[in-house]
Amino acid sequence: ETGVTQTPRHLVMGMTNKKSLKCEQHLGHNAMYWYKQSAKKPLELMFVYSLEERVENNSVPSRFSPECPNSSHLFLHLHTLQPEDSALYLCASSQGRNSPLHFGNGTRLTVT
Amino acid sequence: AQRVTQPEKLLSVFKGAPVELKCNYSYSGSPELFWYVQYSRQRLQLLLRHISRESIKGFTADLNKGETSFHLKKPFAQEEDSAMYYCALRAMDSSYKLIFGSGTRLLVRP
């Protein structure tokens, strides 16, 4: 499979659960990103992993924990989320800092 | 602070009419500007970037540093152009961060 693949497509979880979102890219890119897309809000960059650096949006709560074991895989570990964390979580990758982003289809997360 | 503003949430035009999707940005340095598009049931994808100076699917966008704008234009809209359009800015001094506007839904009616 080519491109950027995210699993699961949909996730419903309670506030006390622990779950993880997975992203895999088959494009040979060296940077991966997590974005959050809430209703009526712009896409919000959460984390970036690249060979040179890890970029973190300081406004992201610690209940979101990223993991990037290699350049092809990216995880977002979730624990004790709040209902306002319900959103579409998009993964993207790029080849270096100057190339465009390639997005996955996203994981629709609902926190009950 | 860096910011991208798309003032229109919805733009509805008839097929064959000209289209202009507005994008204004706030950034004191040298930005790189992009337009991304999301068609129904498809993933978000790059439409064009200002440094390429190219026309994609009939769309063009010119960076106007004086007006801090990067409006997307097409002289004759087609029904298949109906989609969500997002303007995005990359600051040259922190180039992994791509900041998006809130998006404009373009609806092209027959």
Image: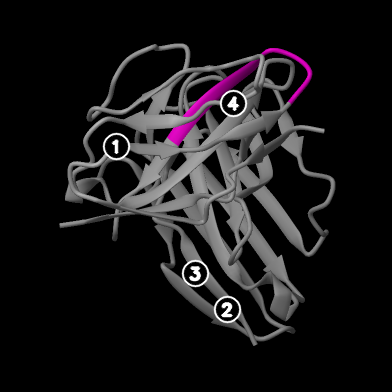
Mark 3 residue element: strand
Q: Is residue A67 above or below residue A37?
A: above
Identify residue for label 3. Answer: A108
What amino acid type is highlighted by mark number 4?
A: Ser
- Alpha carbon separation for disc pair 2 and 4: 36 Å
What amino acid type is highlighted by mark number 3?
A: Arg
Viewer-closest of B15 and A39: B15
Q: Are marks 2 and 4 in contact (CB under 8 Å)?
A: no
What amino acid type is highlighted by mark number 1?
A: Pro
Parent chain of label 1: B
Identify residue for label 4. Answer: B69
Q: Does residue A71 appear left or right of residue A47 in this picture? A: left
Identify residue for label 2. Answer: A110
- Alpha carbon separation for disc pair 2 and 3: 7 Å
Parent chain of label 2: A
What stretch of residues is rendered in magenta?
B27-35
Mark 4 residue element: loop
Mark 1 residue element: loop
Q: Are marks 1 and 3 in contact (CB under 8 Å)?
A: no
Identify residue for label 1. Answer: B18
Give the x, y percent position of residue A36.
61, 56
